[in-house]
Every structure is written in C-alpha cells, then in structure tokens.
Image (tube, rainbow, N blue to C red):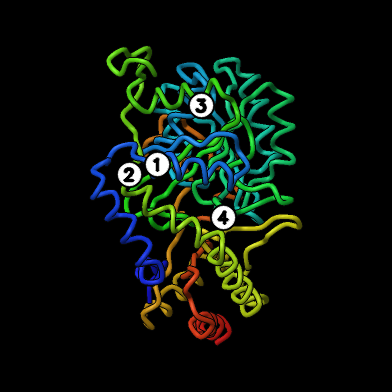
C-alpha cells in the first residue's frame, strides 16, 4: 500500500500527461514555454486571484513573495511553530527573524491568540519591526483568516498565506491561495496538486508586484532587456514539462480528486471517531487533505499503532516530530518550551494515515480496523 499513490494517479491520467510531455519535447520550449503561461492563467482563475507567478518550488514561492514584500534584516516574520521548515526558513535566509507561534490543537493551525501575544511581545522588546504574518494551511485546512487578517490590520502587518499543503481547501467558499496580500503554494509530488518534480507558485492581485515577481524569479532582470538586472533576484522558473504535467492534473483535481479525498477523510472519521481524536474541520471550511492526521493518547500509544500498521504493510507518517523552536537551526533564539504547549502535545501524539483520491473503501476499512483493534484490544 502507498501512503499517497502517485502511480495510481498517473495510470488514471496517463494519456493526457504523456501527450503533454511529448508536446513539450516536440516544441523544445523547455523554459517558460506556452504551457507555463496557460497553467498560470488556469491557477489564477481556480483560486480567484488576478495573477499567478509559477516558480521552481514551494520554498522559492515563499522566498520570492517575501522578497517582493521587501523583508530583510531587522524584520519579524510570524509563522507557525508546527510546520515544515520552509515556512520560517525563507524569512531567515533573507536576514529577517522568524517569530514562531503556537498552534490550535483542534486544527493544528496557527493560534490567533498566540499570534497576537507574539506580536505584542516583539513590539514590547523593540528589537525587531513586525513585518509579515505567514499563516500555514496545514494538512489541507485553511488557517483562521477571519481572526488573523484583523490582527494583521490592527498592527499594520502584511499577510503571506502558505498554501503549500492547502491548495483546493476553502473557507466560506473562498479558496486557499486567495487570502492575504500574497499566497504561495507547492507542487511537490505529494501535495494535493503535485507535479513530477519540484514546483511552486505565488498568487496575488497587485499588477506592479506581479511584474516584480516575474523579474525576481529570473535574477531580477528588466522586462525589456534580459541582460539589464535591476535588482538582485534568484533563478526560479517552473520548467515547461512540469507545467504540461500539471495541466491535466489540475483538471482532474477540480473535477473529482478533491471530492474523492474528502470522501476518504469522511469515511476515516466515521470509522475512527470515538477511538482516536479525528481531524477537526470548522463549519464553513473545506480541507484538501494533504494529510489525514489523527491524535493518539500519547507517544506510547502512537508507537503501538504505527507498529501494528507497519506489520500489515501499511505506511504512516509523523508530521512533525518536533516544533520549529526545537530545530537546531533555531537553537540560538533560545525559545522556551513554555510558549509552545500545544505544539509539544502535537509532536508527541500526531500520526498521518494513507490518503489519496484512489484509496478504496476496503483499504480505509482495513486501516481503520487495525487502529481500532490495536487501541481497544
């Protein structure tokens, strides 16, 4: 059994994907070819944004957006303590300081209360200038933008939505990658919408910043003269083959894959409720289910469940085994565990189960049955 069955997806879409790849090979337009512009148009339309600028990875998407926001030394960038390193590391690489914020254990997303406390703490210290909030749409669920955006407005902060895991999710019918000043996503193969390598995109509505991002992704070049570099940028372009792969995958994602993963998640929840803590989706929210993540009673119970699944050839994953404040790269910040009680609880208890659009009901029943038997005896 596969944790996320990319082979099954490829077989379902093989004729369209193979044709797209062959068309690129025939055209020899390997960099910024026609499918790239077509994909950007379709992605912008899907999310409801005016512009989409693709790039080489989700990490680059975050970095490019922060560069366009002029983030640098002396700035504070607020993000979740319970996420993939890039959500914070992209601020650090630009010379800013990542200010890590505890989570809500129901949703695993950044806690608005902890966020405001962190902003006030930074202001009171007076060492950094609060600049940007990077909420993460973790495991497919949008962050609580109804509370985060007013906090940003209150303190004059920009909002960069990290939708790397959330593409396709929505809040009150407003889709992920449409929140805040800019949004970023990843097309890493295991993401809700993934390519066959690395890829990413930035979404926004501002015409001037759109042009600046297109320059920054190609070394800061002038739109008129590629050998006139107007600022320091990076080399980060989505290659044309990946765009050609993503076009049919986006069509399938919108047509049936998103509904399919929600069916899988609903069935898991129906079977597992009362035995483990199942994922919470607030009213008006829809998840794109990058992961289906349960919470066990403690680390010992999680170890037993994971071992039982492995014995039956069923993979599972721990996202994440430590908070960002526990990473060696941030040890110099001397961040106390007392600021992150919910993250510390999550890292000891979470376990993600196999989930993808092609998982069968029989497989879901089998996985759930093993978990229930292991816990209840």
In front of the other: 365 or 263: 263
The residue pinned by badge 4 equals 140
Position of 173 compared to 135: left or right?
Answer: right
Image coordinates of residue 33 in percent, x first then y, are: 33, 39
Q: Residue at x 61, y 54 (%)?
A: 169
Give the mark, 3 or 1, whose residue is nearer the N terminus.
1
Which is in the foreground here, disc 2 or disc 3? 2
Q: Are marks 2 and 3 in contact (CB under 8 Å)?
A: no
The residue pinned by badge 2 equals 240
Marks 4 and 3 sit apart, C-alpha to C-alpha, by: 26 Å
Seen in the picture, residue 98 relative to 260 is either above or below; the reply is above
Marks 2 and 3 sit apart, C-alpha to C-alpha, by: 20 Å
Q: Quadrant of residue 127?
A: top right
Q: Secondary structure under badge 1?
A: helix
Q: Residue at x 52, y 45 (%)?
A: 43
Q: Residue at x 50, y 55 (%)?
A: 347
Q: Are marks 4 and 3 in contact (CB under 8 Å)?
A: no
In front of the other: 314 or 355: 355
Marks 1 and 2 sit apart, C-alpha to C-alpha, by: 6 Å
Image coordinates of residue 291 in percent, x first then y, are: 51, 61
Seen in the picture, residue 170 relative to 149 is either above or below; the reply is below
Q: Are marks 4 and 2 in contact (CB under 8 Å)?
A: no
Marks 4 and 1 sit apart, C-alpha to C-alpha, by: 25 Å
Seen in the picture, residue 127 relative to 79 is either above or below; the reply is above
The residue pinned by badge 1 equals 36
Q: Secondary structure under badge 4?
A: helix
The residue pinned by badge 3 equals 210
């Amino acid at each position: 059994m596969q944790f996320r069955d990319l082979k099954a997806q490829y077989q379902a879409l093989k004729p369209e994907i193979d044709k797209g790849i062959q068309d690129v090979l025939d055209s020899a337009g390997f960099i910024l070819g026609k499918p790239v512009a077509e994909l950007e148009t379709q992605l912008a339309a899907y999310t409801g944004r005016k512009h989409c600028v693709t790039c080489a990875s989700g990490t680059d998407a975050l970095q490019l957006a922060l560069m366009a926001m002029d983030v640098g030394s002396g700035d504070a960038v607020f993000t979740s303590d319970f996420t993939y390193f890039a959500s914070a590391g992209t601020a650090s690489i630009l010379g800013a300081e990542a200010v890590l914020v505890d989570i809500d254990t129901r949703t695993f997303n950044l806690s608005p209360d902890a966020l405001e406390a962190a902003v006030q703490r930074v202001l009171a210290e007076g060492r950094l200038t609060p600049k940007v909030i990077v909420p993460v749409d973790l495991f497919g669920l949008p962050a609580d933008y109804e509370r985060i955006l007013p906090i940003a407005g209150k303190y004059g902060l920009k909002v960069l939505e990290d939708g790397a895991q959330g593409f396709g999710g929505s809040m009150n019918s407003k889709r992920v990658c449409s929140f805040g000043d800019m949004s970023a996503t990843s097309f890493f193969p295991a993401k809700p919408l993934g390519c066959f390598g690395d890829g990413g995109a930035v979404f926004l509505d501002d015409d001037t910043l759109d042009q600046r991002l297109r320059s920054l992704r190609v070394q800061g070049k002038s739109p008129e003269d590629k050998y006139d570099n107007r600022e320091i940028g990076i080399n980060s372009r989505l290659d044309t083959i990946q765009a050609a792969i993503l076009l049919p995958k986006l069509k399938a994602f919108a047509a049936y894959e998103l509904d399919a993963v929600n069916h899988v998640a609903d069935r898991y929840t129906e079977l597992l409720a009362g035995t483990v803590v199942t994922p919470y989706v607030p009213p008006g929210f829809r998840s794109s289910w990058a992961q289906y993540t349960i919470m066990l009673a403690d680390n010992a119970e999680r170890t037993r469940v994971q071992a039982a699944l492995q014995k039956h050839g069923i993979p599972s994953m721990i996202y994440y085994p430590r908070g960002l404040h526990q990473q060696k790269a941030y040890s110099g910040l001397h961040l106390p565990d007392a600021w992150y009680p919910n993250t510390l609880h999550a890292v000891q208890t979470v376990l993600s189960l196999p989930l993808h659009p092609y998982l069968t009901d029989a497989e879901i029943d089998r996985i759930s049955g093993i978990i229930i038997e292991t816990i209840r005896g």
